[in-house]
């Protein structure tokens, strides 16, 4: 009984430290690093190939960290799709709060047009949060949300989704009536596969999925991705 109380106290302290924004070399919560033969990890906020145009604060390696339940479900999706010769390309997973804060700073800075043509040609960067393209309190920071697309296992080619990842535009809404019917079907194929394993799509972005029920629905973590 005594040791159970001590264990709970230790767990509470670990969870609290994860939310405090302190630098720590290890994740203070047991997130899992997602890896499987048919999952390609290409963390866009680590590489700098993103709308900010540089790596975001808190991404120190090309790793996809997720809550264990979400990680297991994602690996199950990958296994399901591999029977159709498809793999998952993962663009973002757990997102430290400091990376979200980086987005906030970027949106407040004057427009320099460096990434606008590729990521938000018809939107204003100052409106990204109001328009729902980025969240100040993101599900990604709770560890159960993932941004992803599909690729062919044989060739490695990405499937056409109608728009590229993080193309902030109404055409990225999952059910936007695209002229490209194949791309529309690819979006729906991804949604069906994800939903069958417990993920829910954010209707405004074809790539954004949250595993439900969320293991840590109230927590916004801030340890770096290492
Ligand atoms: C920024 C984009 N990849 C994304 O994840 N948007 C949602 C709304 C979020 O920030 O949680
Ligand atoms: Zn997302």
Image (cartoon, grey):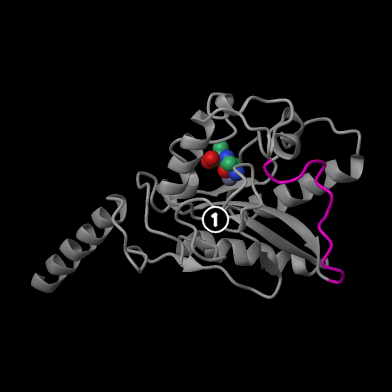
Quadrant (top left, top right, bottom left, bottom right) of the N terminus: bottom left
Q: Which residue is mark 1?
A: 93
Q: Give the image location of residue 39, x and y in percent.
A: 67, 67
Secondary structure type for disc 1: loop
Res 224 seen here: yes
Q: Which is more toward the observer, 84 or 119?
A: 119
Q: Residue at x 74, y 30 (%)?
A: 121
Q: Give the image location of residue 139, x and y in percent.
A: 48, 44
Query: Dot 1, how many residues are within 10 Å of its Cα: few (below 14), some (14-19), or many (20+)?
Result: many
Res 214 seen here: no
Q: Which is more toward the observer, 7 or 96?
A: 96
Main SS category, magenta section: loop
Residue 28 highlighted magenta (yes or no): no
Region in magenta = 154-166
Q: Residue at x 52, y 30 (%)?
A: 109
Q: Is residue 98 above or below residue 158?
A: above
Q: Which is more toward the observer, 95 or 39?
A: 95
Q: Give the image location of residue 73, x and y in percent.
A: 57, 61
Lateral position of residue 23 relative to residue 79, left or right:
left
Q: Is residue 37 above or below residue 162?
A: below
Q: Residue at x 57, y 65 (%)?
A: 62
Q: Quadrant of residue 5?
A: bottom left
Q: Give the image location of residue 117, x and y in percent.
A: 75, 35
Q: Is residue 190 above or below residue 66?
A: above
Q: Quadrant of residue 83?
A: bottom right
Q: Which is more toward the observer, 79 or 35?
A: 35
């Amino acid at each position: 009984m005594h040791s159970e109380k001590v264990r709970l106290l230790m767990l509470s302290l670990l969870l609290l430290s994860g939310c405090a924004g302190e630098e720590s070399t290890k994740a203070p919560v047991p997130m899992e690093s997602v890896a499987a033969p048919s999952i390609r990890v290409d963390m866009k906020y680590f590489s700098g190939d993103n709308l900010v145009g540089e790596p975001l604060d808190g991404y120190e390696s090309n790793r996809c960290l997720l809550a264990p339940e979400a990680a297991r479900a994602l690996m199950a999706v990958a296994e399901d799709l591999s029977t159709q010769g498809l793999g998952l390309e993962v663009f973002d997973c757990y997102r430290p709060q400091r990376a979200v804060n980086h987005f906030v700073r970027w949106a407040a800075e004057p427009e320099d047009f460096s990434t606008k043509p590729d990521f938000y040609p018809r939107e204003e960067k100052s409106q990204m949060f109001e328009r729902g393209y980025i969240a100040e309190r993101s599900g990604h920071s709770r560890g159960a949300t993932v941004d992803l697309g599909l690729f062919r296992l044989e060739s490695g080619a990405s499937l056409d989704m109608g728009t590229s990842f993080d193309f902030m535009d109404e055409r990225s809404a999952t059910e936007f009536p695209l002229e490209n019917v194949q791309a529309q079907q690819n979006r729906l194929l991804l949604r069906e596969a994800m939903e069958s394993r417990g993920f829910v799509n954010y209707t405004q972005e074809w790539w954004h999925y949250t595993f439900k029920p969320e293991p840590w629905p109230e927590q916004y973590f801030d340890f770096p991705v290492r």
